[in-house]
Amino acid sequence: MEKLVSSWYNVVQPLPETYIFPLDARPGKLSTAPSISNYSIPVIDLGSQGHDRDQIIQQILEASQEFGFFQVINHGIPEVLLNDAMDVFKEFFELPPEDKEASIYSDDPNKVCKLLTSSVNYDREAVHLWRDVLKHPCHPLEKFMPLWPKQPIKYRENVGKCSTQVRKVALNILELISEGLRLGSEYFNDELSQETQLVVNYYPPCPDPSLTLGITKHCDPQLITILLQGDVSGLQVFKDGEWIDVEPLPHGLVVNIGYQLQIISNGKLKCAEHRAVTNSSNARMSAAFFITPSPDCYIEPAATLINASNPQVYKRFQYKEFSANYFMKQGNTEVVLEAFKL
């Protein structure tokens, strides 16, 4: 339990050496002002689906092709519900260490619901990430909710309501994508989107944000991710040689394309590298809901997207094969897809 950054960060100066990244991996000096970039992550209004559905589909496809990321507004989730979930996550990480330990603490990678620091590779990694992590599955609720933290008292109620609504938004976006790719509106139903995994990242104020990272650059191995990023910036997306800040948007949700969606689209949609940086003044928290295929689900490019001018790029495999390879390669974006290319 003493490993958790949230338990000791406010009494440690300077940054411990075990959190200092090699020079070529450090974020460098970070500005507190909004970033100046040639790009900005697209914002898509889902509220006009009734009369502008085709336009929304086109916006989603373009954002997914160019950035692999976009934000959505007017998504249908009440603001109070999102706030209640983020508030209870904050309460959880502010619990006394002994209460968090009694509630859920474990660094056992095989445990379904766990609280850990940095990553499951903590004892083997060369450098630690400046974060604590709460992870657990969310769907189906009746199966997994009894395994969730017992404290704070409202945790299960608030997170259960939020995860149900976020999953609906994710499935709606997947339906729009499948229509845009002309796969039929139900293509991503059932096994391809069977599971919802929640990962809550807590990044305490850091003594020197220029030397460390909350999360290193990576792409998500799942199908699609819906992120609640709160009101403190720190998420960055890599495009054309530069890191773009994803500025927090009130009541907005961040959406990013996972590797499985890139593979099913035969490369039409792109999975973008992203990372999380820290800051020295404010704790940051984000909650990522990963829509994930079942382990035994077979993944392959959609047949209707393959033709003479667009030959098949990826081979057929089970999702559990991809997941095992991803974690064995530690998410290294340079090599993680190689085993699945034709």
Image: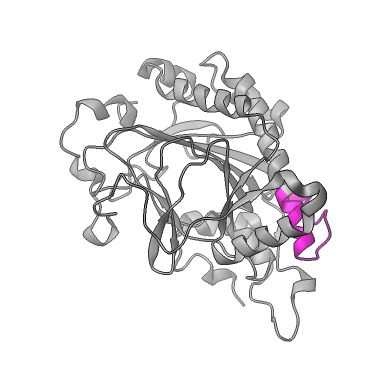
Q: Is residue 174 magenta?
A: yes
Quarter the N terminus occupies: top left
Q: Front-most of 28 and 221?
A: 28
Q: Tell me which corner region of the image, top left, top right, bottom left or bottom right, holds residue 323.
A: bottom right
In this image, 238 relative to 173: left or right?
Answer: left
In this image, 194 relative to 73: left or right?
Answer: right
Q: Front-most of 208 and 77?
A: 77
Number of marks: 0
What range is drawn magenta here? 173-194
Residue 187 lies, in percent from the top left, at: 80, 57
Residue 189 lies, in percent from the top left, at: 79, 50
Residue 270 lies, in percent from the top left, at: 58, 65
Scheme of image coloration: one colour
| Up/down of 110 relative to 21, above or below | above
Residue 193 lies, in percent from the top left, at: 71, 48
Q: Tell me which corner region of the image, top left, top right, bottom left or bottom right, holds residue 234.
A: top left
Q: Is residue 188 magenta?
A: yes
Quarter the C terminus occupies: bottom right
- Spot the residue most to the left: 14
Q: Measuring 55% from the left and 17% from the top, which residue is drawn there?
A: 150
